[in-house]
Image: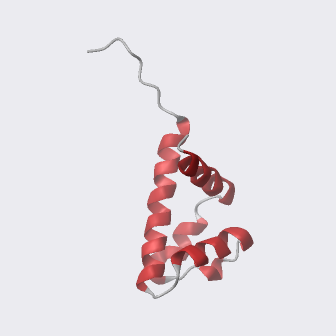
Amino acid sequence: MSGETAIFSIHDKKDYEIHEIVQQVYDALKEKGYNPVNQLVGYILSEDPTYITTYKNARSMIRKVDRDDLLQAMLRSYLNV
């Protein structure tokens, strides 16, 4: 066993949960024949839930995620921080 202390970010769990929700919404949009990236960007920019299908409860799921939290998680993931 090493003497190093493991450090976990408070954001790790939240980011993981957001990732799981976005992935499920992405999959639902794709299954319905939408362009998931365009639809998600439209939703993020406008906060208009009609960009997201109700199929597989995707609209309800994405609305549970705070938009600021979503953008922060995406930026952390993009920057690998």
45 vs 49, nearest the viewer: 45
Q: Position of residue 81 (x, y in %)?
A: 55, 40
Quadrant assignment, res 10: top right
Q: Quadrant of the N terminus?
A: top left
Q: Position of residue 25 (x, y in %)?
A: 48, 72
At x 59%, y 60%, the residue is 65
- The mark total stands at 0
Q: Position of residue 31 (x, y in %)?
A: 41, 83
Q: Residue furthest top?
A: 3
Quadrant assignment, res 38: bottom right
Q: Please tell me whether residue 10 is drawn above or below residue 2 in the rendered image.
A: below
At x 70%, y 77%, the residue is 48
55 vs 38, nearest the viewer: 38
Quadrant assignment, res 4: top left
At x 66%, y 60%, the residue is 67
Q: Please tell me whether residue 17 is drawn above or below residue 80 in the rendered image.
A: below
* Left or right side of 47 for 39: left
